[in-house]
Image (tube, rainbow, N blue to C red):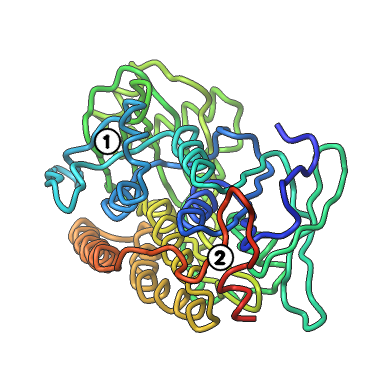
Amino acid sequence: MNAKPNPSHDRYDAIVVGARCAGAATALRMAQQGMRVLAIDRSAYGSDTRSTHALMRPAVHLLDSWGVLDRLKEAITPTVRTTAFYYDDEVIEVPIKPSGGVDGLYAPRRTLLDASLVDAARQCGAEVLHRVSVRGLLRDTNGRVSGVTLEGESGAHRELHAPLVIGADGVRSNVAGWVEAETYQPATRRTGGFYAYFRGIDRPGYHWYFLRQTGAGALPTNDGLTLVFVAVAPERFERAARGNHAERKAAFLRILQGCDASLAAEVAGAEQVGPLYGFPVAFGFHRSCSGPGWALVGDAGYFRDPLTAHGITDAFRDAELLARAAADGSPAALASYQATRDQLSQRFARITDEVAGLAWDTERIKVLHRDMSREMKRELEHLQQLSPLEQWPDARFTRANGPTTLGPLAIAQ
């Protein structure tokens, strides 16, 4: 725990606000390129957060290339080798074929995933502070973002400077608000849902249910647990969420029963581990994700309904793209980061918006899933074609002695 702001330096090449999967991944990739980077998060190290966990092939590919995937395997995260889709009376099972170094998919607990990324970032030289809040941005005389003001648990303040401040602080991003990032392509539909962890469900692989205007899923995760979730229209979720714990659990089981009786029976007979979580979902959006001295990554810059289960994959993709833009350091590279993100996400966002509307019939949801598969393939191909990132050729510092230059981001000012 950090009782007060206690970074090692006053100046960094980049400061990342948020150290969950998007922020920690961005800090890791920047540190791997030799940048002096600080990531800050107001939550505790290794704490949980509301999330479904499913990693898709592009995310697994990136974790492998970053050197983090083995940490998840060592923690006995189940390897997913099949994905099953349930439509009315039809089940379509898709094998996960090994390809490009990816031998399967994974759905790690966020307590493991986020901590593993933080650990990897620290090992590469990044600083990560937890239980510290960012209270505002610093600006130079031209209005360019130039750093942050921190506040620790004791109330102590400290100003830190960097030529790039990155908001990785979620859907309700303070950084996005402070820089007045433009919002565009807003979603028109959303869901609400419940999930919990259960011991005693024997369903290896990913299981996705799209029946009777309900989405549901069963995902194997760490410690022999299976995450089971349901997603329904917001009005239905709000009615179900009004009751006490027992009433919400009963509503969860009724929704599951109406979607798939077999899964509901398994859940009813399984041991629930931990509480039943409810999550009203915000409308999706794109935000401008770069500007003078700032950038956004993860849900801070782009969010869509979690029913299509691609949020963590989006965060990892954008962390990789942003780290490359930051290593280049030019305004053109940061502008290209946003253009590439949009080119890889906007069609998927439109598909997600229709899926979240829950108005599809069986044939239409199959078409939407085929469209999603094509978008994921396109995304993976883009990531696989990226050239390896090299450390800055003109960097004139080592971590042991500290920087004598702030690298290309400072040069580009």
Q: Secondary structure at mark 2?
A: loop
- The residue at which mark 2 appears reads as 396
Residue 178, image x, y percentages: 73, 68
Q: Which residue is mark 1?
A: 260
Quadrant containing the C terminus in the rendered view: bottom right
Instruction: Give the CA distance from mark 1 to mark 2.
Output: 60 Å
Q: Is residue 40 left or right of residue 61?
A: right
Q: Quadrant of residue 209?
A: top left
* Residue 198 versus residue 99 in the image, above or below: above
Residue at 22 percent across and 35 percent down: it is: 205
From the viewer's perspective, tell me whether residue 36 is left or right of residue 379.
right
- Position of 106 with respect to 314 (left or right) is left
For this view, does 146 lie left or right of residue 372? right
The amino acid on which the numbered mark 2 sits, given as a three-letter code, is: Arg
Residue closer to the observer: 235 or 364: 364
- Residue visible at 36% across and 24% down in the picture: 225
Q: Which quadrant is the N terminus positioned in?
A: top right
Q: Amino acid at mark 1?
A: Asp
Q: Nearer the viewer, mark 1 or mark 2?
A: 2
Q: Is residue 115 visible?
A: yes
